[in-house]
Image: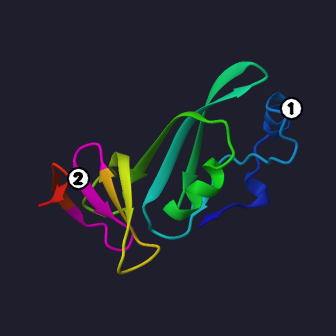
Amino acid sequence: MFEVSHLWKSKSSELLRALFERPERQGYRFVELSLNVQLFHVDASVTVAGENYATRFIFDNFGDISELIVGQDFENVKISMQTKREDAIDYSFDVIEEVFESDSSPGTYLYRCKNNVVKMDMIYDTLLPFDDGILV
């Protein structure tokens, strides 16, 4: 879950709302991630008033991404996973190429990444080698 405070509002919110014709939006200079979980970055291109812009959304739950994407005119969508924080390990980002929902635990996903590594949902964060479509 992302948390914000009204004290963290961006001074450029009015300009951005007008520029992108989104009066319902409020900008914040930063947000707090309350739980130590992996994050999902959704990068896409969107056309506004004939101009093409890059945009990024950040999620703490993969299941919420489809709610954003359905019905949108996004182009060049790329979803990446950022690992959760661990004291002795740097963050890593992996581009997700394929997603599988667990049969034994609905709502839990496996992610096949561009580097042929399969990652599991946030609690496990286990790395499994992946070779030619088969878990090794």
Most foreground residue, 11 or 77:
77
Could you tell me which residue is drawn at 73 percent across and 53 percent down? 8
Specify whether 74 is left or right of 131: right
Residue at 71 percent of width and 48 percent of height: 28
Q: Residue furthest left?
A: 136
Residue at mark 2: 117
| Magenta stretch, main secondary structure class | loop
Image point (25%, 67%), residue name: 126
Q: Residues within 10 Å of mark 1 (few under 14, many from 20)?
A: few
Residue behind mark 1: 18
N-terminal of the pair, mark 2 or mark 1, is 1
In the picture shown, does residue 101 fall above or below 91?
Answer: below
Q: In the rendered image, which quarter contains the C terminus? A: bottom left
Amino acid type of the residue that numbered disc 1 sits on in the rendered structure: Ala
Question: In the rendered structure, does residue 43 fall within the stretch colored magenta?
Answer: no
Write the residue at 37% across / 74% down.
123
Q: Which residues are magenta?
A: 113-127
